[in-house]
Amino acid sequence: MKNYLLTHFDDIEAVPCPCGMSKRAFVQPNNSTASTHYVEISEDARTHYHKTFTEIYLILETEGEAFIELDGELLPVKPMTTIMIKPGCRHRAVGKMKIINTAIPTFDPDDEWFD
């Protein structure tokens, strides 16, 4: 077994997520370390939170004004902004943007919670 994983986002099919479409790298059996997602946020996301994993967002592009809402606080973002979102933090993206999202440990779709 190799001691690394390698993929290319062009080879990953996008799936719907609470804020648009996501290409999820390294979400696979036997990988509990982390996953990385390329997300095209096409609409204001639904406020949600995770109980078990931390997310790190890297804003790549924005179309007009863009914000991140964290526990009710609306903060402006621009390209190259990074945000660490800890478990339990209610969050959502506001505006159109493209991001890289790293989930630690690996993303689990059963750990998306909505109020």
Image (spheres, grey):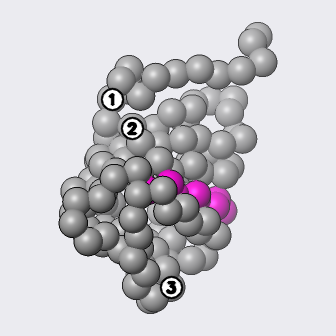
Type of amino acid under label 2: Lys
Q: Residue at x 40, y 84 (%)?
A: 74
| 49 part of magenta stretch | no
Local secondary structure at mark 2: strand
Q: Residues under labels 3 and 1: Cα distance?
A: 31 Å
Assess disc 3: are there few (<14), some (14-19) or many (≥20) residues with their C-alpha within 10 Å of its C-alpha. some
Q: Is 3 rendered above or below residue 15? A: above
Label whose residue precedes the other's in the sequence (3 or 1) = 1
Q: Residues under labels 1 and 2: Cα distance?
A: 6 Å
Residue ID for mark 3: 71
Q: Is residue 101 left or right of residue 61?
A: right
**Would you say residue 53 is visible in this rendering?**
yes
Residue ID for mark 2: 23
Assess disc 1: are there few (<14), some (14-19) or many (≥20) residues with their C-alpha within 10 Å of its C-alpha. few
Q: Which residues are magenta?
A: 51-59
Residue ID for mark 1: 13
In the rendered image, which quarter is residue 89 located in? bottom right
Type of amino acid under label 1: Glu
Q: Quadrant of the C terminus?
A: bottom left
Q: Nearer the viewer, residue 81 or 42?
A: 81
Q: Residue at x 22, y 59 (%)?
A: 63
Residues under numbered marks 1 and 2 in contact, where contact means CB atoms less than 8 Å apart: yes
Label whose residue precedes the other's in the sequence (1 or 2) = 1
In the rendered image, which quarter is residue 77 located in? bottom left
